[in-house]
Image: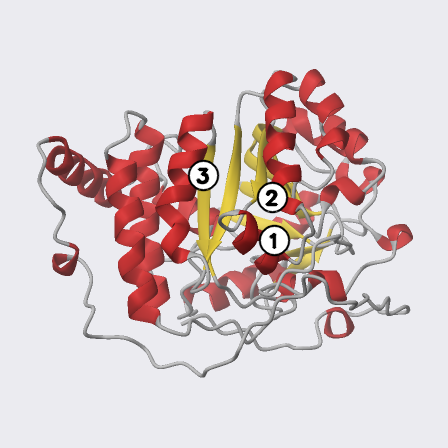
Amino acid sequence: MDLTVISTFRCNSKCQMCYIWKNPTEPKEEVSLETLSKLPNGFDNLNVSGGEPTLRKDLSEIIDIVYPKARITEISSNGLHPERLVPIIKKYPNVKVRFSLEGDRETSDAIRGEKNGYETKVAGLRKLKEAGGTDLGFAMVIQDENVKQLVDVYEFARKEGYELATSTLHNAWQFYKNDNYFYERKSVARQVEGLIEAMLKSSKPKNWFRAYLNLGLIEKILGHDRLIPCSAGKDFAFIDPWSDVWACNVRSDLPMGNLARQSWDEILNGEVAQRTRKKVADCSQNCWMVTTARTAMRSNIVPQMPKAEPMMWVLKNKIKVSVGKKICFDSYINYSDVRPSPFVKRETYLDKNVKAKLVKGRVTPDEHYPLKTFMNN
């Protein structure tokens, strides 16, 4: 099982596609070390994210607690405070770190509302590499404003010896956004084809399967169904800053329990979690993100291996690109079927004096996540 610990909603970025930064949590209310110590061992991938996890003064202690509990421990960061991660990497060189990067200098800083953000995170990842980091990379949210730079970002990361994780515009309670829509779905989807072919040309099997993951992103961008059904609440879960456990980070009607008040076993085997898994089985949304896609692609028999469908697709198309042939994406993707969506203009917050507003006294999930409805099709 994969687990994401959303350690805080405080954030020092001002992203146009995510409004966590407008909805910060109070440090004293955020999931505690004592609560996290209740987690059992045996997770596959355990990601400490946010908000911005480096704003937690006890991040090092969090990693000390969760590191023994998972095969892979990950930190998802905006990369604006790389110096706070150096001691962690020196202690745990194989902790996986991903810094958010949305394109070249101008594009990334504009999308993320970060002054000099690009230089800070590029230099910062190099610092982590010098500190001994072995699993470092960037994470990019594909959108109309940056998709033409997608292959360039991949090639930059590859030449630097880094990984590249990709996702797309998404609506979710974690992001406090329910109006993220593509302007030109088909145009954006076509650009992703170049990344898929570049990844298949790589010598790293991990990139070959990321190519399949990006095939799923094309389906999501166009508004199609998922390539493989979702297994939220069974193969992955999320803990929010208030210690509430959720099947996924999208729908705020899929609770499982609260780790501060219950044990992990009580949460997984409780009636609330059972009802939520039934809802997941009937969910028609395409929430094809790294966590939801990675777990769906895994074999049910040997979790470190992929299912037969992605395996066969990868082998067939790896051979194609290896002998110089092009992939016929139209044989996999129905580009004539593009779901209509409303036009909602995104705006950059770079150089805008917009401050976050701390709302105190939020107790219930409805108060935590007032938007309630989050659609991804």
Relative to 68, 2 lies left or right: left
Residue 343 to residue 50: above or below:
below
- Residue 109 disc label: 1
- Between residues 325 and 72, which one lies in front from this camera angle? 325
Around disc 2, counting alpha carbons within 10 Å, would you say few (fewer than 14), some (14 to 19), or many (20 or more)?
A: many
Amino acid at circle 1: Asp
Q: How far apart are marks 1 and 3 (CA)?
A: 18 Å
The mark that comes first in sequence, 2 or 1, is 1
Residue 224 visible in the picture:
no
Circle 1 SS class: helix
Name the residue located 52 percent from the left edge and 34 percent from the top edge: 137
Residue 265 to residue 72: above or below:
below
Amino acid at circle 3: Leu
Residue 193 to residue 23: above or below:
above
The mark that comes first in sequence, 1 or 3, is 1
Q: Name the residue under label 2.
A: 118
Q: Name the residue under label 3.
A: 164
In the rendered image, residue 185, in percent from the top left (x then y), is placed at 34, 70
Amino acid at circle 2: Tyr
Q: Do the residues labelled 2 and 1 touch (CB within 8 Å)?
A: yes
- Quarter of the image where one finds residue 191: bottom left
- Quarter of the image where one finds residue 82: top right
